[in-house]
Image: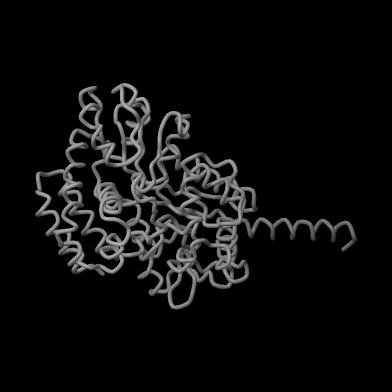
Amino acid sequence: MNRLASAVCTTSLLTVSQLAIAVDLEVTHWWTSGGEAAAVAELAKAFNQTEHTWVDGAIAGGSAARPVIVSRILGGDPMGATQLNHGRQATELIEAGLMTDLTELAEREGWRDIVNPVSLLDSCTLDGRIYCVPINIHSGQWLWLSHAAFDAAELEVPQNWGEFVAAAPKLQDANILPLAMGQQGWQQNLAFGAIMLGIAGPDAWAEVNVEKNAEVAAGPDFKKVFQAAAAARELAKNSNVQDWNQATNMVITGSAGGQIMGDWAQGEFQVAGAVAGEDYTCLPGLGVNEILDTGGDAFYFPVIEDEATKKAQLELASLLISPEAQVSFNLKKGSLPVRSDIDLDAANACMKKGLKILDEGGVLPSSDQNFSPDTQIQIEDLMAEFWTSDMTAGDFQESYSDLIKNAD
């Protein structure tokens, strides 16, 4: 073989080799609203700049997506990567040997030194091994307020939950729904948790949610939490939307005064061109107790017996926690980054509030970290029943404390 032929042959082999390691990696997630889609597009764009391709596997709604994700993995049809929440949603899959061990990558890149708070990484850890990469921090304890709605009712924008409740009658007089609420158990549970933190305070919240103290939940001091939830139910009585982003849109358009929703609502405000402090106000901890939980999202990588796919999975894991991805994704998502060593000068006023609380250590574990998926479902079912019925505050408290008593 002459030198030219040899060179051509070598070049061809290199081309085939390069093509062979390029992977179409399916990534499942439930980010389908406008703000969420804009955020996940940042991740896809970054991954597509490698030799690999992000194959989007969006499934609308976390409650609908999680069973599909788990079923596919158990059924031998795994995706390349999947979103789940921080916490215990993947424990059984890990124990079954179906999730990729990321420990070597995490140690090589020093994840324990850069993830803040480190409890997020602990939520990815089982028996000392790391199985997921946390990508953001989401907190549910936010009250979002429409300036247009309060202007129409000739009211000052409230600065805390008490002022918001007091303003509700004038909003109703102006034909404005006081509280937008999507008709799903997880949204109602999120609102109840925020009310609990705002009314009872962080110590009592932790007693119930972390220590699972049913006596505190059933006690006389906690009675005011359930009464406040019953009052909030009345404020949301005519909220006839299903999805959280539909409720957020009611706040954006001024047809509702406010919404209790996680910081991901910021993504919807941004897509609509709304400006924090001008068009809307955000009150962490309902403006009462400025403490946030550390919920959020992490990515897991199901075990796939293909070396090229394994390599692509690790490349994606590394990319997700990289400074560049942390900035571009979280600025669009409205969530806080898991890294404390990145520049977020471009953050809006609401994100900066969250960053300040995080920097000061005002955080609590999320319900996904505190409760098993089975307990979560039971609580959400109770919330759906309470928010759509005339269940009394007393009956609600009794049923809820029973769930806490038997929670795992």
In depth, the one of 55 and 181 nearer the eye is 181
Relative image position of residue 408 (x, y in whole percent): 26, 69
Relative image position of residue 93 (x, y in whole percent): 38, 69
Task: Quadrant for residue 258, please give it.
Answer: top left
* Residue 256 left/right relative to 397: right
Give the image's coloring scheme: one colour
Query: Is 58 located above or below residue 152 in the figure?
Result: below
Relative image position of residue 267 (x, y in whole percent): 45, 39
Q: Is residue 186 visible to the viewer in this orientation of the structure?
A: no
Residue located 45% across and 71% down the image: 125
Q: Is residue 159 visible to the viewer in this orientation of the structure?
A: yes
In depth, the one of 15 and 290 nearer the eye is 290
In depth, the one of 258 and 384 nearer the eye is 258
Relative image position of residue 368 (x, y in whole percent): 34, 60
Task: Quadrant for residue 235, please give it.
Answer: top left
Query: Is 300 located above or below residue 189 in the figure?
Result: below
Query: Is 93 located above or below residue 368 in the figure?
Result: below
Residue at the outermost bottom position: 127
